[in-house]
Image (cartoon, helix red, strand yellow):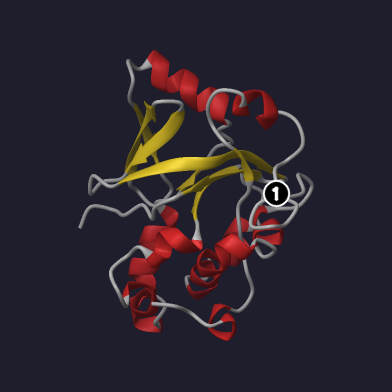
Amino acid sequence: MKLSLKALGVAAVLTTSVIGGAAFAASHMENPMVGGAAMFPDKNIVENAVNSADHTTLVAAVQAAGLVDTLMGEGPFTVFAPTNEAFAALPDGTVDTLLKPENKDQLVKILTCHVVAANVMSTDLVGMINADGGMHAIPTVGGCTLEASLDGDMVAITDEQGNVAHVTIADVRQSNGVIHVIDKVLLPAM
């Protein structure tokens, strides 16, 4: 399931600071490095993502799905951005299969289930989780409903199949929204 750099093409990524404890204080300062690259709050999601070494698979998927222009748009968007390792954890051949033109609709559905049509910072999300008794429903632009909760000092995002991703870097500010890096790919109900 490894993709060559050639197959990946241009990269699009997300960046930030860890959710929990002291990370909340850091989240309102400078953007964190993501994938070894600086993330600039005056650049859009795609302009930043292409520089992250940890998000080359995500960038390739965004390109294959034809979502580059959308994610360069005005927004605001909150993107839960899976790392290369998150994609690598999918069953063998899954990514290669999804990147094929004949599977574009399925790829679009999966990717848009990682996007929320709002600018949601981690402190706001934790506040909503607490206000809703420990679990907050998040509707996505792809029509999925994710469930946000706290797992210790980390925000956990549960997809429609019951898979749980953790936010590893939060509040990477972009000119058209925010990125939260996650450690699993979120999947819609099948």
Question: Where 128 sits versus 169, above or below?
Answer: above
Few, some or many C-alpha atoms within 10 Å of disc 1 (few <14, some 14-19, many ≥20)? some
Q: In the picture shown, does residue 169 fall above or below 129? A: below
User: In the shown orientation, is residue 2 left or right of residue 7?
Assistant: left
Q: What quarter of the picture does the C terminus occupy? A: bottom left
Q: Quadrant of the N terminus?
A: bottom left
x, y percent for residue 83: 50, 58
Helix or strand or loop: what does disc 1 sit on?
loop
> Would you say 107 lies left or right of 188 here?
right
Q: Quadrant of residue 23?
A: top right
| Amino acid type assigned to the residue bearing label 1 in the image | Met
Q: Residue at coordinates 72% horizontally, 41% vertically from top-left?
A: 31
User: Residue 118, image x and y in percent?
Assistant: 55, 37
The image quarter in which residue 121 lies: top right
Task: Give the image location of residue 44, x and y in percent.
Answer: 70, 53
**Residue at 46% over, 26% down:** 153
Q: Which residue is mark 1?
A: 33
Identify the residue at image location x=48%, y=40%. 167
Rendered residue at 42%/41% (across/down)? 166
| Camera-nearest residue between 9 and 20 | 20
State the residue in front, 93 or 48: 93
Q: How many marks?
A: 1
Residue 65 % position (x, y): 47, 70
